[in-house]
Amino acid sequence: MRKSVTSVLAGVSLALACGTSVHAQEKQLTIFWAEWDPSNYLQELGNEYEKETGVKVVVETTPWADFQTKAFAEFNAHGDAYDLVVGDSQWLGAASEGGHYVDLTDFVKENHVLDKMAEATVKYYAEYPGGSGKYWAIPTEGDAVGWAYRKDWFEDPKEKEAFKAKYGYDLDVPKTFKELTDIAEFFNRPDQNRYGIAIYTQNQYDGLAMGVENALFSYGADLGDYSTYKVDGVVNSDKAVAALENYRKLFGFTPPGWTNAFFVENNQAITEGLAAMSMNYFAFLPSLLNESTNPHAKDTGFFANPAGPGGDQFAALGGQGISVVSYSNNKEEAMKFLKWFIQDDTQKKWADLGGYTCNKSVLESEAFQNATPYNKAFYDTMFKVKDFWAVPEYAELLQQFNQRVYPYVVNGQGSAKEVLDAVASDWDGTFKKYGRVK
């Protein structure tokens, strides 16, 4: 919340009593983010910034479950507790139209952000409305949905021989959704407590949507036309229907009761030796290399989301961009931090610490791609990502999607065509309600 005059005067008195200048006390930036490993890495990077500039950086965190609620409560109160926020891409519409984010269009152009960062990350983490050339954030924590797999199962000579005999081609990391589905079917052996695949099914927020998008985008389909808000004939196209049908098929090869699975459960599918392959955000894959928590760490590999029937290859976007809060009293210092953050050498430090950089030159470097077993798959993915709607009413659209798609994926209720026709109708009604279409 905004500081009262009394608290400000008290702070001045304390500073004078301690022999500290008020100006020095003001040299602090507070960044708000969710509580996870990347926020710890950002704090380490902030400590580097303090060493170089004398400006203290504090990364304040809260659990993911409270992140959006707490952020928007502060925004709506016009509070100045945060100078910057690392917000979800879906916040762009609500935060920009609500006046909560500083317009960074001039900053992006003057500092050549479009040249420095992977194009898709600028498009989805920073630009709103889509295609408008208006920017509200700087790509920060790149993320998308990728895959982990059991290398030892894939490389077992007997398994390879049996797979070749059944499917007519060599067992290897899947390059297409057909291969992904074949492999999931092949390794699905309930009598051995071994299953083919783990996919997202949780429908409380965006887990299910991100999982379905992984298939839908690579099948050459889209959620709609983001510039015109046309959804009928797009989200329910033949390609989208085929993608949803395949996602339902994949569900048939998941472990028992896999009806509320998101990033925790999908990592457990690997650590507990349940599944041959598991989808997850790249941000949660590093823990699979920890031998103290994953007994199969040495046998865990990673790959990018495969291509669909037409050769399209995309992945559902995760991650966040960093924005300057409109109500901050330290906007000038915040801009200086952003200018430092986007530099190539800073982005290399960010990647070295464990942050998922969106910087093109770092992503394309051999040093980055060879640094971890998952970095190459991450690189392959971050130039091929697409996102959910970033409009202010995105939560309503997401809820409608979940309500329609979930019963089909986990229970086979209705057909994929019926489900997506209903989604198109729901979304068209929502866009009409908010005046985006007539």
Image: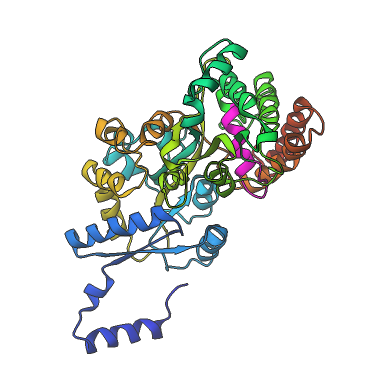
Does 14 sit left or right of 391 as displayed?
Answer: left
Q: Residue most toward the front?
A: 158
Q: Residue at the location (40% across, 34% down)?
A: 378
- Tell me the chief SS of the magenta region: helix
Q: What color scheme is it?
A: rainbow
Does 99 sit left or right of 400 as displayed?
Answer: left
Quarter residue 127 falls in: top left
Q: Residue at the location (33% across, 41% down)?
A: 108
Q: As rendered, which of 39 and 156 lies closer to the eye?
A: 156
How many marks the image carries: the answer is 0
Q: Is residue 381 above or below residue 79?
A: above
Picture coordinates of residue 381, whole percent (x, y): 43, 31
Does 321 sit left or right of 390 as displayed?
Answer: left
Picture coordinates of residue 200, whole percent (x, y): 62, 40
Quarter residue 23 falls in: bottom left
- Where are the magenta residues, as a range? 201-216
Q: As rendered, which of 240 and 7 lies closer to the eye?
A: 240
Picture coordinates of residue 93, whole percent (x, y): 53, 46
Instruction: Specify whether residue 276 is painted magenta.
Output: no
Query: Does residue 393 appear in the picture of this structure?
Result: no
Picture coordinates of residue 35, whole percent (x, y): 46, 59
Query: Does residue 100 appear in the picture of this structure?
Result: yes
